[in-house]
Image (tube, grey):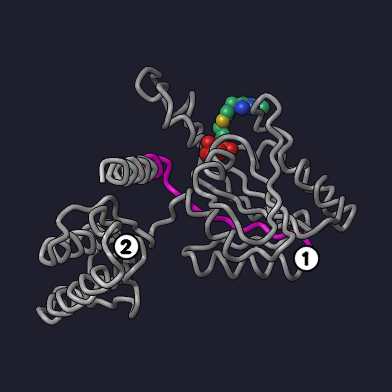
Amino acid sequence: MREYVVELEAVVPSLATASVEEQERRADTLLDTLEAMAEEGAYGIEVPAAFGGLGGRLGGRFYVKAAEANTALELGMSALREALSKVGCPEFAWLRVMAEPFEGRVFPELAACLPPGAVLVAGNSMPVRDLDSFLAPQDGPLRCLANRGASGIDGVVSTALGVAAARVGPVVLVIGDLSFYHDQNGLLAARLHQLSLTVVLVNNDGGGIFHFLPHLRHAEPFEPLFGTPTGLEFRHVVEMYGGRFVPVAGWEEFRSAVRRGVQEGGLHVVELRTDRRRNVELHRQVWEAVAQAVRGRVQG
Ligand SMILES: Cc1ncc(C[n+]2csc(CCOP(=O)(O)OP(=O)(O)O)c2C)c(N)n1
Ligand SMILES: [Mg+2]
C-alpha cells in the first residue's frame, strides 16, 4: 500500500448559476461531509478553505492509501461522488483529476508559469490541438506560434530554435515524442549558436493522435503501423547536445523545471510521460463535461 494524493474538482451545473452565498453554503456542507468521511477512516481529506463562488466548483484533495495510482483515483472519485450526493449535488459536469499527467493540462500550467513576453511554440499532432482546446485567453502577453505547413511533424525543433534565434523573449516548445525524434538533430543549432530553448517533451511513446482517429478501429495491426512506439530514452540525445534533461512526475515539478529552464537559459528538455490510451479517455471526459456545462447554461 502506498499513499497517493488525488486532487479532484467537480463542476456542478446547478450550482454554477446559484448565488455566491448558496455556493458557499454548499461548499461548507461539502467540507463537513468530507471531513466526517475522513473521520470514518477511509480517506484523509483536505479542502481548500475558500472555494465557494467559483462557478459551481467543488473539490478537495484526497489522501488515499491504495496499491496503485489508478485504484487511488477510483477511491478518491467515489468519495467525492458520494459526498456530492450527500450535499444535494448529485449531478456534476465533470471531475477534474488533477493528479494525472493529462496532456491537455500542459497549456494551462504553462500559462500560469511563463513570464510576460514568452513565446510558446506548439508542435503539430496533439500539442497544437491541445493549445487550441485548453489554453484560456490570457491577461498578460503570451505569443503563440506554430508551423502548421501541411501538418508535418518534421522540422519542429528547428522551427522553435529559429524563433529562439530571433531573441524576442524566452521560447518554450511543446512537442510530441515522435516529432522530437524526427528532428532531434536540429538541436545542434542550440549548441552552435548558444540558443535558449525550453522544450516540453510530451512523451506518450508513439503517435497519440491516432487513438483519436478511426484508424484505431480499422487498422490492424495498430501498434506497428500507427502507434509506432520507439521506447527511446531521450536523455542521451539531449545531453549529447549539451542540454539538461529533466523528467517530471507531477505538476509542481513540471512548473519548477519549466521556470528553471526559462530563467537559466540554454537548452532544457522537460519530459512529461503520459499514456496514449488514458489520454483519449481524459480528453473525452473533459469534452463531455464542457458539453454538459454548456447545455446546462443554455437550458438554465
Ligand atoms: C513528416 C510527417 N510524417 C508523418 C506524419 C504523420 N503523423 C501525423 S501525427 C503523427 C504522430 C506524431 O506523434 P507525436 O509527435 O509523438 O505526437 P502525438 O500524436 O503523440 O501527440 C504522425 C506520424 C506527419 N504529419 N508528418
Ligand atoms: Mg507521442
Q: In screen coordinates, is 152 left or right of 167?
A: left
Which stretch is magenta? 265-281
Residue 226 is situated, as x and y percent measured from the top left of the image, at 48, 26
Please tell me which residue is depicted at 80% across the width and 47% down the height of the picture.
163
Say whether residue 282 is left or right of residue 121: left
* CB at disc 1 and ligand 1 closer than 8 Å: no
Under mark 1, the amino acid is Gly
Question: Magenta stretch containing residue 1, yes or no?
Answer: no
Quadrant of picture, ligand 1: top right
Q: Residues within 10 Å of mark 2 (few under 14, many from 20)?
A: many
**Image quarter in which the N terminus is found:** bottom left
**Along the horizontal axis of the image, is 155 left or right of 206?**
right
At mark 2, the secondary structure is: strand
* Tag shown at residue 265: 1
Helix, strand or loop at label 1? It is loop
Could you say which is closer to the camera, residue 258 or residue 230? 258
Q: Quadrant of residue 23?
A: bottom left
- Identity of the residue drawn at 72% across and 58% down: 118
Q: Quick check: is 280 in the magenta stretch?
A: yes
Question: Disc 2 designates what residue?
Answer: 57
> Going by the image, does 168 lie left or right of 95?
right
Q: Residues within 10 Å of mark 1 (few under 14, many from 20)?
A: some
Instruction: Tell which tag, 1 or 2, sits nearer the viewer.
Output: 2
Q: Name the spot of residue 97 as percent of width and height, x first.
A: 34, 58
Residue at x 66%, y 61% (from the top left corner): 140
